[in-house]
Structure formats: structure tokens, C-alpha cells
Amino acid sequence: MSARSFRLFAVGWAGPVSLLALGTALGYLGYPWVAPSGDGASLEDTHLHGGESDAADDSGIVHIPHDLQSANGLEIRRAEVRPFESPLHVTGTVSADQTRVARIRPLARGVVDQVFVQLGDRVNQGDPLLSYDNIDLGLAIGEFRAANADLRSTGTNLEVSETILARSREMLEVEAVARTEHDVVEAEFRSAQAQVDSARALVAKFEEQLHRFGLTEEDLDRLTQGEDPDYHRTVSHATLRTPSSGIVTAYDVGQGEVIDPSSELLTVTDISVVWVLAGVSERDLSAVRVGKPVSIQVSTYPGESFRGLITHTGDMVEQESRTARVRCVVRNPDGRLKLGMFATVDIPSGSTYDSLAVPSEAVQNIHGRPVIFVRRSATEFELRQVETRLESDGWVELLSGVSAGDAVIAAGSALAKAEALHDEPGGAH
């Protein structure tokens, strides 16, 4: 190739290459002005700004209009510093209220047919627990039926004796029979009457016994009328029912097992009220007073206190620990306190200190945490989680969450709780 041809070839390629480089540079520099916005924003931009849309949902502000406040008697009170008694910090355990424990035993000997519950089941008053073939009931039914048959037999004899006596009297009037013979007939009649009375008393005795086993008048009628000849076999199968609502906390029975009144088959415990048994050192017992409120905490619900009442102080000091048992009664309607839980108990000691507090009715419970509602404006209230401790004279001590002078909802705080739950995902709408 000649030198002139080579120069022309080089110039021919230089033009397109230069144009391509210039276009790339302009495209790079112009990208910020032509990049799409909105749904086409970069991942980095979405990461930086995407969280702002949830701020209003998680603000914790509850809106309650004036008319709704008036209709529900909403009352605003201020958090204030009040005196509280210094607590004794002791430990204890959650136990069953022994007045609410039902130990289930059979009324008589028998063989278990079927058990309807398991350990830990919740039961309501009147629910069936187990059924069993009541041997003693079967024997009593047999005696009752025999006594009824005897009553019918003696009744028939009495009717015959009464008829004979009536004829004897007629014959005596016309002197067709001797007085001595008539007296014998009359004595036989009176004997028949006595036999009927005795048989009737025996039937009444067995009726009462069957009633104690749980049979009704209708059951007794079916046993005596004979319309269902096999009913005496089925009715002897008794059902034990729970006398109160609660939880099956003990279980010692199985199908086919022979049982008797000494057998403790099941235990049903009502835990809507529980005891917290605290150990108080003998040097601190002088500060413990029956009727005093206490504050109880368990590790399962950090920052939350349960309120109890001292109902009994033990009369014995344990030799090893040198402590006495103090019984505190605690309401537990939702069953959050479990039997056997380890607890910390704050018992008022008599000496006082000042602490921030709000009225007791201001504290609500949401998702296992105590909360209050602080007024932000005439119709806006801020939900705040708080940490509670002691309760005294209608006020609850707060360790965090509010400041002195904060206006909080007291009466009517349940309305604010309902509104807060209403606005949650999955809440009522």
C-alpha cells in the first residue's frame, strides 16, 4: 500500500472512533439528569428513604374525639411525686390457692371406662372428667329393684288380706263366724300392713342412696317400670364432672383401672387467683402487716409488676433459712402467672420515700407490657411503655416512661387501649 493510501485509511477510521468516544462521555455526564425517578429510583435511594412511610403508623398516637371522650367519662390526671413505703425485697414462688384446688375421687368402687381429659387441659365447671362402672351403685340398684319387687308382693298380700277381713266382718255381723276366728283374720291383715310399711321404708332407703349416687327420679322410674330391662346395667356407669373451672394439674388414672373412694384420680386447680409464698427473714417480720399491698415481679415479664395482698404470715421460722412464710394473694385472670414460677416480692417496710406516680386506673396492659396514655393535644394521646413498681392508695409508682406534670388518661384509659389495638394490623376495623 502506498503512503498516500495508508493516510487515507487512517483518517477513515479516526472519525467514527472519535464520535463513539464523544458519545460515551456525554452519556456518562448526562446520566443524573436523565435517570428515571419514582418507581425507577435506585436501590440505594429506596434504602435511604423507604422507612419514612411507616413513621406515622408507629408513632403511638391515639386520636380520641371530644364527643367520644365525654361519652366514656375520660378523665385527665397529672403524674406527680408521692410518698411510698420503702419495700423489703424478698423472693418467693407462685403456688396454687389451696381453697381453689379440687381433688377428684370416686364416690364408690368401680372400673374406669374412659378418661376424657389429659394433664394440663383447661376445663369448665360441669365438664366430664371420666366415666366408670360403679360397682357399689350396681349393687344398690339391684337391692332397690329387689325392694320394689318385695313392696309389690306385700302390697298384693295386703289387698287379699283386706278383702278377707271385709268378708269376715260381714260374717261376724250375722254370727256366721266366731269372734276368735275374726280376730285371727284381723291380725293377719295388720301383719300384712306392717310388711308393706317395712317394704316401703326399705325402698325409700335405697332411693335415697341412689340419689346420693346422682340418679334422678326419672332414672328411678325407668328402673321400676320395666320398660327398658337393660337400663339397670347402663345407669350404673357413672360420670365424674369437675366441680369448678381450672386446669388439670394432677393425673393418676387410666382406662380399666379399679378405683375406690380412697383413690385421688385427678386434681383441677383454678389459677384465676394464686398465692405467692415469700420467705421473709425473721429480723424483717415486724414490718409485715396483713392487708398490706405488695408488688410482685417475675422474670418472664420484665418491667411489669403484679399487685397482691398479704393475707397471712406464717407462725413458724424455718431453722435453716431463718425465714417465715408470708402468703400474698394475687389475681391472675388471664393465667399469665404459672404455678412454680420464681418471683421477687416488694413488701412495704414502714419507712417512706418520694417517687413519681400516676393513678392506678391510668395503667393498662398491652401485649404483656404496662402502658399509659399521655396527652399531646385536646384529642391526641401518646402511648408510652412504662415500668411500674409499688401500688399504694390508688397510685402506682413509675420507674420510667413519664415526667412529673405529664397529663395522662386516668378514668377511661380502657377506651384509649381499645383505640390503640383497633389501629394495629389485624385489629378490629
Image: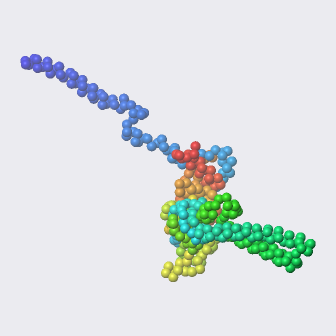
Q: Residue at x 11, y 20 (%)?
A: 6
Q: Residue at x 30, y 28 (%)?
A: 27
Instruction: In the displayed orientation, state which residue is furthest to the right.
Output: 174
Instruction: In the displayed orientation, state which residue is furthest to the bottom.
Output: 319
Does the image show residue 243?
yes
Closer-to-camera residue (128/229): 229
Q: Is residue 279 above or below residue 47?
A: below
Q: Residue at x 59, y 57 (%)?
A: 363
Closer-to-camera residue (167/32): 167
Closer-to-camera residue (96/218): 218
The image position of residue 201, as x and y in percent, is: 74, 72
Does the image show residue 343?
no
The image position of residue 24, as x and y in percent, is: 27, 28
The image position of residue 77, as x and y in percent, is: 64, 55
Q: Is residue 315 above or below residue 124?
A: below
Q: Count the labels in the image.
A: 0
Q: Quadrant of residue 124?
A: bottom right
The image position of residue 195, as x and y in percent, is: 76, 74
Q: Quadrant of residue 19?
A: top left
Q: Is residue 42 above or below residue 278?
A: above
Give the quarter of the figure containing the C terminus: top right
